[in-house]
Image (cartoon, rainbow, N blue to C red):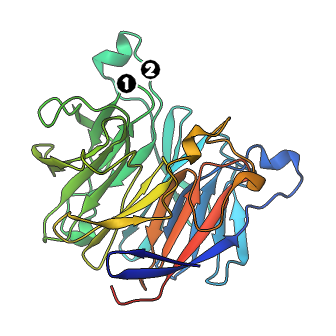
Amino acid sequence: MSLRAGNLQYEWIDNWAKVVDTDNAGQIDGRTHGVQETSKGEIVVFVEANPSVLFFNTDGELLRSWGHYPNAHGLTLVVEDGVDYLWLVDCDLWAIKTTLDGKVVQQIGKPAHPIYEAGGNFAPTWIAVNEERFGGNGDIWYADGYGSGLVHRFDKSGKYLATIDGSTGAGHFDCPHGIAFDYRDGGSKLFVADRGNCRIQIFDAEGKFVESFGENYLVAPDCFSFHGGMVLVPELFGRVTLLDNQNQLIGSLGVNDAAKELPNWPNLLPSELEVGKFSSPHGGTFDHLGNIFIVEWIIGGRITKLAKTSPT
């Protein structure tokens, strides 16, 4: 099945890979929440299952797996001195940085912010790093998307520096879910998926507001991936949106506005899904060839590949 957004065309490859269910009870809910491509071209998926970190080859075959993170959520891949690392965010109060074989090299928990000292909830969702390989300073930004709606800044050693809440920009964040740095113009800009407000807010590397957009066409932006000047924006309410190099809308893929009206959504069963239509995209990434991989918040998980069939 072919999908189009503007002049772009992709082939929907259903169930490109499947979540490992080693012992039935180990799968838990199997909801697939994050996906990235490694420097070697492997696709890594972060899933609420046991094991939680899954590595696939380009044919969707499982290569290896490790870890058990019951509240697996955000996944970010960074490269330092030519070595790949993963930032894994578990909504149960922490984020860890690991090697590709699962060795923990850094951990960040709840910062000492007044809102938490006063009893505010902390439920983190995503990490973004201002990577030095792109001219950044290595700062780590940490989204408390499901807690108090804040984005915290740490230096590369993990020392807490500051917090932004959107109030100096387009307005207070409402579920700042996914965050990522954009280096397309040669600088470092922090993209914040202000999901509850149906918009994207952009800040510079110091946390100063730059711009906001998307209120007139975004429905529930989750996170970001960048490739060839484009921005990939998985949206929880049944669509995947593409933006051009000026952050203008190209179009959306797999649109399924009715999905969120189904009973028990987003925790649907595989039998309730439609080929060619998304239900609840939660994570997404371009690979180095411009293909798209989408993972969804669905019981048992769903990993879909959108194979590029037109120039980008």
Image disc number at residue 148: 1
Residue wearing tag 2: 121
> Type of residue at label 1?
Ser
Compared with residue 267, is residue 54 higher up or lower down, i.e. above or below?
below
Q: Which residue is depicted at the point 60% across and 62% down?
A: 45
- Please give left or right for residue 148 compared with residue 208 in the image: right
Q: Earlier in the sequence, mark 2 or mark 1?
A: 2
Callout 2: few (<14), some (14-19), or many (20+) C-alpha neighbours within 10 Å?
some
* Spatial separation of the CA atoms under disc 2 and disc 1: 6 Å
Q: In this view, does 196 lie above or below 13?
A: above
Viewer-proximal residue among 209 and 13: 13
Q: Position of residue 121 (x, y in %)?
A: 44, 20
Q: In this view, does 96 lie to the left or right of 137?
A: right
Q: Is mark 1 on a helix, strand or loop?
A: loop
Question: Residue 23's spot in the image, x, y percent?
Answer: 89, 53
Report helix, strand or loop for mark 2: loop
Pointer 2 with pointer 1, Cβ within 8 A:
yes
The single residue placed furthest to the top in the displayed view is 118
